[in-house]
Amino acid sequence: MKKLIVCALLAAVLAAVPAFAKKAYVNGIDPDYPPFAYMDEKTGKPAGFDVDSMNWIAKTMGFEVVHKPMAWDGIIPALLAKQIDMVDSGMSITPERAKVVQFSNPYWTVSRVFVVPADSKLTPADILSKKIQLGVQRGTSEANDIKKEQEEKKYPFELRFYESSPLAVEDLLNGRIQAALMDELPANNAIENGRAVKKAGTHGEPDNFGVAMRKDDKELQKLVNEGYKKLMADPYWKELQQKYLSK
Ligand code: ARG
C-alpha cells in the first residue's frame, strides 16, 4: 500500500516537471478545408484526414497535439512567430515555402482542378482564354502559380481571392465568378455535399502535401516523419482514406 502511494506521488511529481511531461505541439489548421481539416459541425471540434492523422501520430510517438484554427493566409507567419509549431492541413510543398520552413516527407498527392457551375460549358481552355472571373483561395500554391502564369502568358481572366475554397464555391453558385481553381479533394467534397458544381478538368502539375515546421525544429521533424512512416504501415491509414478521401 505504502509502495503504491509512493509510486503515485512520484508519477504526479514527474508529470509536473516539464522534462518528464509529454511535449505539446500546436498544429495550425485551416478550419474550412474539408476533407483535410475542418470544424466538425456536430462536435464543434477540429476533424479531417490531416487532423486524425496527426492525432494518431502524436499518440504513437508520445507527444500531445492541439489543433488551432486560423486564417490560411497568415499560417506561415504564425509558424515563424511560434504561435504554432506545425501546419498539417493540406499544405503543398513548394520551393517558395521551403525557403522559410522545412517540410516533412510528402504524405499525399492531389491534382489541381478547375471547378465550374454544374450547367457551365466552360472548358479549361476557355477559362484560360476568356475574360472571366476566376476564384482562388488566398495564400495557396495554386493562387501564386496561376498569378505568375497569368503574368507570363497574359491570360485575360480576372483573379478573385477568397478566404477559403468553400467560399469560392458559394460565389460560383451565385454567379459572381465563373470558375475556381483548387485542389481536387476539396472540389470533390463540394460536389458530394450537393453543391451544384462540377470539375471542368485539371490544371498544371499535381501538388504534394507535407507538414510544415520551423527549420530549426529537427526534433519535431523526426517525430513527424517517423510517425507518418508508422501510420502508413498501419491499417488505420487505409481506414482514414476510406473515411475522408475515397468517395
Ligand atoms: N494546396 C494548396 C496550398 O498548399 C491549397 C491548400 C489550402 N489548404 C488549406 N488548408 N487551406 O496552398
Image (tube, rainbow, N blue to C red):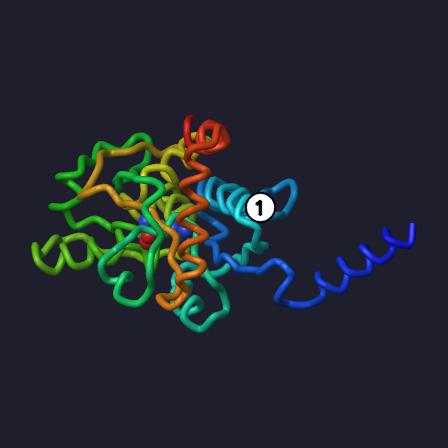
At x 35%, y 49%, the residue is 210
Between 65 and 126, the one lying in front of the other is 65
At x 47%, y 49%, the residue is 32
| In the image, farthest residue toward the bottom | 81
| In the image, farthest residue toward the left | 153
Label 1 CB sits under 8 Å from any ligand 1 atom? no
Report the number of numbered marks. 1
At x 59%, y 54%, the residue is 64
Could you tell whether 141 is left or right of 15 in the image? left
Residue flagged by tag 1: what amino acid is it? Lys
Mark 1 neighbour class, 10 Å CA radius: few under 14, some 14 to 19, many 20 or more = few
The answer to whether residue 176 of the structure is visible from this angle is: no
At x 29%, y 38%, the residue is 116
Residue 174, position as x, y percentages in the image: 39, 44
Residue 241, position as x, y percentages in the image: 44, 31
The answer to whether residue 198 of the structure is visible from this angle is: yes
- Give the structural element (helix, strand or loop) at label 1: helix
Residue 153, position as x, y percentages in the image: 7, 54
Which image quarter holds the C terminus?
top left
The residue that disc 1 covers is 59
Residue 16, position as x, y percentages in the image: 72, 65
| In the image, farthest residue toward the right | 1
Could you tell whether 100 is left or right of 228 in the image? left
| In the image, farthest residue toward the front | 3
